[in-house]
Amino acid sequence: MDQKTAQTLFEEGATLIFLNVPEGTEFGIDYNTWTVGERFKGVKMIPPGVHFVYYSAVNIRDHQTAPRTGFFHNFKRKEILVKRWNKKDEDIAEERYTDPDEIARYRDTLRDLDRFLGPYPYDSLKKWVSLSNHVTESVLERLMPECGKILSATQLESDDATRTTEDRAKLAEARKSEQETSTAEQQLPRMHVISGTAIRFSAIPQNYPQGASPSEITKHSMDSSYALQSLLDSSYKDNPKDLLGELQFAFVCFLIGQVYDSFEQWKKLVHLLCTSEDAIHNHPEVYSLFITILHFQLREIPSDFFVDIVSSDNFLTSNLRLFFDNLKESQGVQVGLKEKGLKFKRSLTRHFKWNFNVVHNDEDDPVVVEVS
């Protein structure tokens, strides 16, 4: 990057000022991760748009890394976002720096801070955009946990009172009496997820309407369009494409945020979209974008994990086979969408050596073909 371009990006891009981060901390933004040095104070030249910032405290002596924590932020042009590390909590401090005068002071000293700010790595921007271009402000408002952070480790607390010494003594006495009549599983601590820490993913609706006849239940079990339309009507009526934002949000939280529950939501949404035959001609733009999104996502899944999701219940190949069959057989599907789906199918066969044309009664392992 030449000096003139760098100067323009510095002046027009956003800046994340991250103060008091301990040396050795793992820090990242989007598709890039670094180990913090002693001079680190943030990131400059951030392109406007949605980005994912994350970090993990590191015990340098024992080489132990804490579970990853992160947050999404829709950076505006020339915005300055200020965060400060809380040493006691090993996390970002709760206070928000929104006072205009304070932000103005940081802006006045931005040139002096320049040597302590790492430049946003533009060589990976295209890849990040391909994974997040449908994650809008409205999608973030809908899905982000109330605490404002994406937490890779589920935050749990005891169902029983344990705050005081008296509480703990009473609990120990109660557990002692329970040991005589309860199983080992029943003696495990009773826990629940701390309110406000979970991602607010959409619930997948029931596959068929209330009061459906047996024949209707069978029909809707073979075609998930009713469930998909119910989800769009209840959650994304104003903009059906925001469902794709949730699909991307779940994928990023899994791939980069290391949240396993997000992977489960991603699978649910992929299955729902792949098994909805009637919805393909009702929402052609959604499905055209869905193909593009899957194309980029499948290329970013780590190879070791990719083996698991292909072999476990044959998830990907069985769902994609249904999707390609639905594209082919569904009446009224646009020619351009069918052609795009066929190109995607050929690309997967070429890249992963899957053959979607061979049907197995037991839906077992994918067929490997040799591609010249």
Image (cartoon, grey):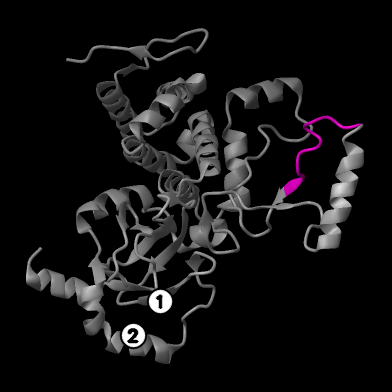
Q: Which residue lies furthest to the bottom in this view?
A: 101
**Neighbourhood count class around disc 2 (C-alpha, 10 Å): few under 14, some 14–19, many 20 upward:** some
Which one is nearer the viewer's eye here, 259 or 219?
Answer: 259
Say which quadrant the N terminus sits in: bottom left
Element on which disc 1 rests = strand
Q: Which residue is painted at 50% across and 46% down in the image?
A: 259
Q: Residue, x 51% and y 56% (percent of image)? A: 150
Depth check, front residue: 127 or 27: 27
For image coordinates 38% across by 85% down, the residue present is: 103
Main SS, magenta residues: loop
* Residue pictured at 26% horizontal, 80% vertical: 113
Q: Which mark is residue 82?
A: 1
Q: Which of marks 2 and 1 is nearer the N terminus?
A: 1
Give the amino acid type for the residue marked by disc 1 in the picture.
Val
Nearer the observer, 81 or 341: 81
Q: How far apart are marks 2 and 1 (CA)?
A: 9 Å
* Rendered-image quadrant of the C terminus: top left
Marker disc for residue 106: 2
When the figure is inspected, residue 203 is found, relative to residue 22, above or below; the finding is above
* Relative to 216, residue 118 above or below: below
Q: What stretch is highlighted in magenta?
A: 181-191
Give the image quarter of residue 107.
Answer: bottom left
- Relative placement, left or right, of 205 versus 118 is right
185 left or right of 121? right
**Mark 2 touches mark 1? (CB < 8 Å):** yes
